[in-house]
Image (cartoon, rainbow, N blue to C red):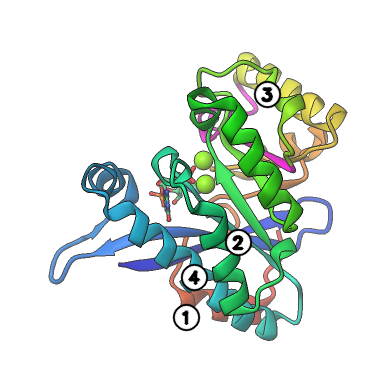
Amino acid sequence: FMVYYQPKADIRSGRISGMEALMRWNRKGLEIVSPSEFIPLAEDTGAIYTLGEWVMEEACKKLMGFNRISGQDLSLSVNLSVKQFSQEDLVPKIRQILEKTGLDGRLLTIEITENIVISDIDRTIRILKELSAMGIGISIDDFGTGYSSLSYLKKMPLAELKIDKSFVDDLPQDPESCAIVNTVIALARNLSLKTVAEGVETRSQLDFLKETGCDEIQGYYYCRPVSASEIESFLLEEKSL
Ligand code: C2E
Ligand code: MG
Ligand code: MG
């Protein structure tokens, strides 16, 4: 297993703002397997607990090195699945990783999906508050694709909404996608949350998002997910949008 990193860029400055850790399964002699394929399997077998912990520790450790290279305090986003979130000792495990790696909690963001909210709202809020007290940012991944109600937005200590790729795909030609993205950005702004658009592949998508007031983008237009050594070269290049 390997961790790939996909940078995020700040739309206003055009510069890198952080990166997301994305798991890869490199099977010897075979093609690299995508997490959408093996994560459901890892969840069924319970392997996701060890794997998830490993990804977080590995990426936190690497981020310290990446930040030495870039000379900036770039942030790291790590995905947590519903199953991982249901772990009893999630908070102490994350605290342990921060202590072990020496990473400042303020540089870590945890990406969860709306489905986490549905399972047990009181427990979810309690855990998110504990993480938030450690400086960790909470982001809602694939925002707008789940089945939850909006009321959780005011109860949870959130920092960020990630606009799902399915809404970004048809920008700016599809009026419905434009309306949804516009509304999500306005909603986030009114709640003082940052917005990140994912899956941005074209200049015209970027232009629309810039005009609409989106804060950050992530996608092939800026950079694909790459290995740790490739991200080091990317940081040295200081590529801007
Ligand atoms: P996600 O967190 O929503 O990540 C975004 C996915 O979109 C990634 O797929 C990324 O490679 C892909 N992507 C980014 N920009 C573009 C673009 O411009 N065009 C296109 N076509 N795709 C783009 P990936 O890496 O295959 O990951 C899929 C999902 O697997 C992730 O969705 C996340 O939910 C999950 N995942 C990945 N790593 C982990 C992990 O360490 N733990 C857990 N629990 N889930 C993970
Ligand atoms: Mg994500
Ligand atoms: Mg996503």
Please tell me whether mark 3 or mark 2 is closer to you in this view. Answer: 3
Residue 166 is situated, as x and y percent measured from the top left of the image, at: 51, 29
Tell me how far mark 1 sits from mark 4, CA to CA: 17 Å
Please tell me whether mark 1 or mark 3 is closer to you in this view. Answer: 3
Check if mark 1's residue and mark 3's residue have beta carbons within 8 Å.
Answer: no
Three-letter amino acid code at the position of disc 4: Glu
Q: Quadrant of the C terminus?
A: bottom right
Tell me how far mark 2 sits from mark 4, CA to CA: 15 Å
Q: Residue furthest left?
A: 29
The residue pinned by badge 4 equals 57
The residue stretch that appears in magenta: 159-173
The residue pinned by badge 2 equals 19
Residue 169 is situated, as x and y percent measured from the top left of the image, at: 53, 32
66 left or right, relative to 21: right
186 left or right, relative to 143: right
The residue pinned by badge 1 equals 229
Label 2: few (<14), some (14–19) or many (≥20) C-alpha neighbours in 10 Å = many
Tell which of 173 and 27 is nearer to you: 27
Which circle's residue, 3 or 2, is located before the other in the chain?
2
SS state under label 1? helix
In the image, residue 226 above or below residue 46: below
The residue pinned by badge 3 equals 152
Residue 6 showing in the rendered view: no
Residue 220 is situated, as x and y percent measured from the top left of the image, at: 52, 52
Q: How many marks?
A: 4
